[in-house]
């Protein structure tokens, strides 16, 4: 077809406009950020909440907006058990459940971290997670479609109830909320209490209404969930340890462009260092605020009382060998420099 010069220009312009229009969805798609939904059960103003926020900031800055991290704190998307199912289904991409919540997934070895008095301090815990035991445990998640990215510390457990919990006899018949770990169940029974598994999001109202009498937990969670308002007495027993594994849906993670995955790995490493660095001070600050509120008494057990707790609780290590695995327990003992109390 012979076109006048003017018509030829118009036709070329139309072809160009068409090509641009046809390309637009592809361009938009290429530029749409990768979304990571990161769900967790605690308040934003806690070591885990702050660690998640730090990861978001680092990841978004380092990928220059190619990745967007959406945080869903306070169980607003899913509760404890549901969030693990949601991760496996790909409804969320990232979580940071406590190590006490992996049993229902079928990876019972994680419950080794719940054995009473197993870590003398936070360095002992880190020696385990930073070494081969931490890496081996993450490998056990892979067949479940989960990839482990980091371990975040949150300090030592304290106990609370509406009666003072000083000696072991004080626990008799107390209904105590626990996370889903069978080791924690055995621990409460060894104290003479009645354990009750319950989602974290239900704890405050269960304590308020008397469905349970008491709980264990860390000061940062006691403070942000206002547990101290519905518990008259707190004991600084430090009998157990709370930590998290930051995990992602493996299919999602493996499917990321390699450069993005390595940038996110770096962001997670830095967020992990940060979360671990703030855990002690965040919990100490929370405990100060609880003390200042005057709503709960805060009791430090005597040496003799603690010896009694240990005597009652140490048999749980042996009792749980069949569940957690003797080899896992021994590997943790070795890495943590565990010495059985006399
Ligand atoms: C709990 O359920 O008590 C804790 O695991 C909550 C948390 O994530 O710190």
Image (cartoon, helix red, strand yellow):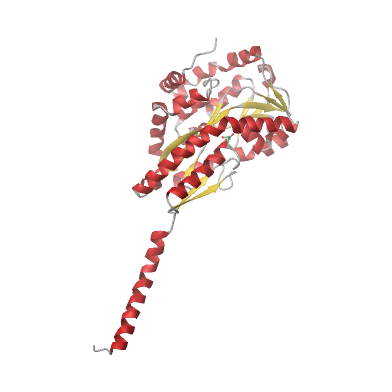
Instruction: Name, please, the residue furthest toward the right.
Output: 294
Instruction: Name, please, the residue furthest toward the left.
Output: 1
Which quadrant of the frame does ligand 1 lie within? Answer: top right
What is the x, y in percent for residue 266?
Answer: 41, 41
Between residues 9 and 173, which one lies in front from this camera angle? 9
Q: Is residue 49 left or right of residue 297?
A: left
Q: Is residue 263 above or below residue 118?
A: below
Q: Is residue 103 above or below residue 61?
A: above
Image quarter hosting the N terminus: bottom left
Identify the residue shown where x is 41% and y is 26%: 133
Q: Is residue 184 left or right of residue 107?
A: right
What is the x, y in percent for residue 115?
Answer: 52, 23
Q: Is residue 83 left or right of residue 302?
A: left
| Residue 80 seen in the figure | no
What is the x, y in percent for residue 197?
Answer: 59, 33
What is the x, y in percent for residue 129?
Answer: 45, 28
| Residue 38 seen in the figure | yes
Residue 328 sits in quarter:
top left
Identify the residue shown where x is 55% and y is 21%: 116
Between residues 79 and 93, which one lies in front from this camera angle? 93
């Amino acid at each position: 077809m012979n076109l006048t010069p003017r018509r030829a220009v118009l036709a070329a312009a139309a072809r160009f406009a068409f090509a641009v229009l046809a390309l637009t969805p592809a361009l938009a798609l290429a530029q749409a950020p990768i979304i990571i939904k990161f769900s967790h059960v605690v308040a934003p103003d806690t070591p885990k909440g702050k660690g998640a926020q730090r990861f978001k900031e680092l990841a978004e800055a380092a990928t220059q907006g190619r990745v967007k991290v959406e945080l869903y704190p306070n169980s607003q998307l899913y509760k404890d058990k549901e969030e693990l199912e949601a991760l496996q289904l790909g409804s969320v991409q990232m979580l940071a459940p406590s190590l006490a919540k992996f049993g229902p997934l079928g990876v019972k070895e994680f419950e080794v971290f719940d054995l009473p008095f197993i870590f003398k301090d936070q360095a002992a815990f880190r020696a385990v997670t930073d070494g081969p035991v931490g890496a081996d445990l993450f490998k056990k998640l892979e067949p479940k479609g989960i990839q482990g990215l980091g371990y975040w510390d949150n300090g030592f457990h304290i106990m609370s109830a509406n009666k003072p919990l000083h000696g072991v006899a004080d626990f008799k018949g107390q209904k105590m909320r626990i996370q889903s770990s069978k080791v924690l169940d055995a621990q409460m029974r060894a104290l003479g209490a009645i354990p009750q598994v319950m989602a974290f999001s239900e704890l405050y109202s269960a304590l308020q209404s008397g469905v349970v009498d008491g709980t264990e937990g860390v000061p940062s969670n006691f403070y942000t969930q206002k547990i101290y308002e519905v518990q008259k007495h707190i004991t600084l027993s430090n009998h157990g340890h709370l930590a998290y594994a930051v995990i992602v849906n493996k299919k999602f993670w493996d499917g990321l462009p390699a450069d993005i995955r390595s940038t996110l790995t770096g962001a997670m490493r830095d967020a992990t260092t940060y979360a671990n660095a703030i855990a002690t001070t965040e919990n100490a600050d929370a405990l100060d605020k609880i003390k200042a509120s005057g709503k709960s008494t805060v009791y430090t057990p005597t040496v003799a009382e603690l010896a009694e707790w240990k005597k009652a609780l140490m048999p749980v290590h042996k009792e749980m060998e069949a569940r957690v695995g003797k080899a896992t327990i021994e590997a943790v003992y070795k890495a943590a420099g565990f010495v059985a109390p006399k």
